[in-house]
Amino acid sequence: MPGDQPRKNMVFYRSEDAVSLDDDGMMSPPDITPAVYKTHDLSPMADGNKVTVLFKGDGPDGFSLVHSWFGANFQLPRHSHSADCLYYVLSGEISMGNRVMTAGDGFFVAQDAVYAYIAGPSGAEVLEFRSATSFDMKVADKTAEQWRPIIEAAVANHDAWVRQ
């Protein structure tokens, strides 16, 4: 049809060209309660995760693929996203409650469902598949007390994360 953009039948991407999730802007910054910042120094967490956008399709409903690396014992706060996501564990392990997932395992989280996980003792690498190129992160852990174990794990593991 006149004026329609031609459809790309194949698109290639290279991991070396991936940009950080923060730099890409695909995910809006999480809204963390000021009380958490006033009580805890969140900076040790920064070295415990590296999240990059491997692929980002066209338009808001395009496919996206994100690679996440988490250092040993990294803990995510309870949170949700505004888009469905299919997760695949590439290496290491993650724990969600009493369920442990290792390489080759995965899980699906519907939009707005609250979840969290903890990377295993050797860390984890996870792929995140979405049919969205823009989404948010709503943090459900609102109190400084809820963040205490997350920050304690970051402080305890920070030196090991930096060495990796």
Image (spheres, helix red, strand yellow):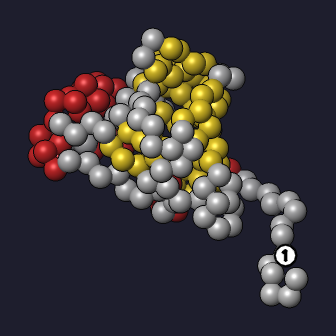
User: Is 84 rendered above or below residue 102?
Assistant: below
At 20% from the left edge and 47% from the top edge, which residue is drawn? 33
Residue 30 or 4: which is nearer the viewer? 4
At 29% from the left edge and 52% from the top edge, which residue is drawn? 31
**Quadrant of the image containing the N terminus:** bottom right
The type of residue carrying mark 1 is Pro
Please identify the quarter of the rendering in which residue 90 is found.
top right
Q: Position of residue 127 (x, y in %)?
A: 62, 38
Is any part of residue 115 visible from this angle? Answer: yes
At 18% from the left edge and 36% from the top edge, which residue is drawn? 143
Question: Residue 92 vs residue 28: left or right?
Answer: right
Q: Residue furthest bottom?
A: 2
Question: Residue 146 vs residue 19: left or right?
Answer: left
Residue corresponding to mark 1: 6
Question: Residue 56 vs residue 148: left or right?
Answer: right
Within-10-Å neighbours for mark 1: few <14, some 14–19, many 20+ = few
Q: Position of residue 51 (x, y in %)?
A: 51, 46
Q: Residue furthest top?
A: 98
User: Is 26 rendered above or below residue 83?
Assistant: below
SS at circle 1: loop
Question: Residue 116 vs residue 33: left or right?
Answer: right
Please identify the quarter of the rendering in which residue 117 is found.
top left
